[in-house]
Amino acid sequence: MTDEAPDISALSLDAIRVNTAALAGDVLRTPSLTLDSGLMADVLGGGAAVLKLECFQHTGTFKARGALSVARSLDAEQRARGVTAASAGNHAIAAAWAARQVGASAKVVIQSNANPFRVEMAKAQGAEVIMKAPGAETFAEADRLVAEEGRHFIHPFEGPLTSLGTAGVGLELMEDAPTLDAVVVSIGGGGLISGIAAAVKQMNPACQVFGVEPVGAAGMHTSLATGSPVHLDQVNTVADSLGAPMSLPLGHALCATYVDEVVLLDDDMICAGMVAFQQEAKLAVEPAAGAAIAAVMGPLRERLQGKRVGVIVCGANIDATTYTALVARGIPAFEVLTKS
């Protein structure tokens, strides 16, 4: 028996528009702003960076869109049983928020190495939090809650409703900046880029879509190179939001269809991206967001000369102490990038 390729037709442009309109009263249409920065103009050879500011979304990240898309699909009986999620933090926060919007309870499983700031944010959204070891144990506990309590599992990055939710980011960006030449998106499990890329490419096939992953969590890069989803033996990156231990079939299929290339960054470069956002845009973001601008300044720089580039600022859920340490780490790499 052979595995059938996932059906990506659920991510048609019409479906993306319908879902985005349905969420419009509950999620924010975040700003798309051109970064007025001499440094970025130099980096892009006279081009421009257009920032899609999902860091201003409810719950502090893009995750609210996919989580609410799933939560709104639940019937009354499912809502009564509540939801669960497995997460490094941001998705748990979003799942708890989405549950509140539809009148459901949330019992979420968060990795034990998660930033305590995010754990407290999930609790503040009304979630009961269970801490488990990263990876298999976190997902196994969520599976237990599904089996024993009948809770509905809101997956952190896989599923048509999740990708339809995140596709709204791409739809809004292309409506705001229709002449973009490229869009750069950080990748964890692929939930964000799968939706954005589907929207961008169907609205403007000539616009390139580049993904960015840490070298220590290169699941989508590896899966695209090998032609099928992969599970990673280990994950090692400061960008905890990008530390998904696997890629999965629908996200892989959407990326294989709509993403032009995935580039890799080491952690010092990711931290340099945080410095760039702080100094050039006055934005304090988490490492996952820093990765996108770092890719523009580093491995994608030559190919983006003279281009108008959309940069997805995916989130900003980070505490002051961790932020300060990571920005300090990124300064040497930032100085190298700005002198190159």
Image (cartoon, helix red, strand yellow):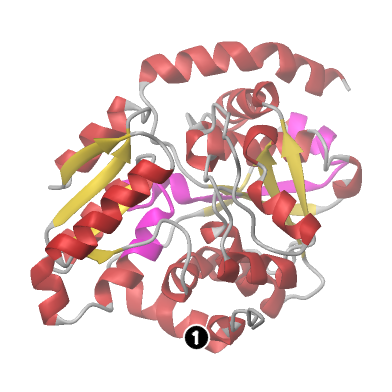
Give percent across and percent down for residue 81. Answer: 11, 68
Q: Is residue 94 at least partly visible in the picture?
A: no
Looking at this view, is 271 or 81 the one in front? 81
Residue indicated by mark 1: 15
* Residue at figure coordinates x 80%, y 56% from the top left: 225
* Residue 263 located left or right of residue 24: right
Give percent across and percent down for residue 301. Answer: 85, 40
Locate residue 99: give its quadrant.
Answer: bottom left
* Residue at figure coordinates x 26%, y 75% from the top left: 72
Q: Which residues are magenta?
A: 39-67
Q: Amino acid at mark 1?
A: Ala
* Residue at figure coordinates x 67%, y 21% from the top left: 268
Looking at this view, is 309 or 200 the one in front? 200
Q: Residues within 10 Å of mark 1 (few under 14, many from 20)?
A: some
* Residue 183 located left or right of residue 316: right
Image label count: 1
Q: Is residue 209 above or below residue 290?
A: below
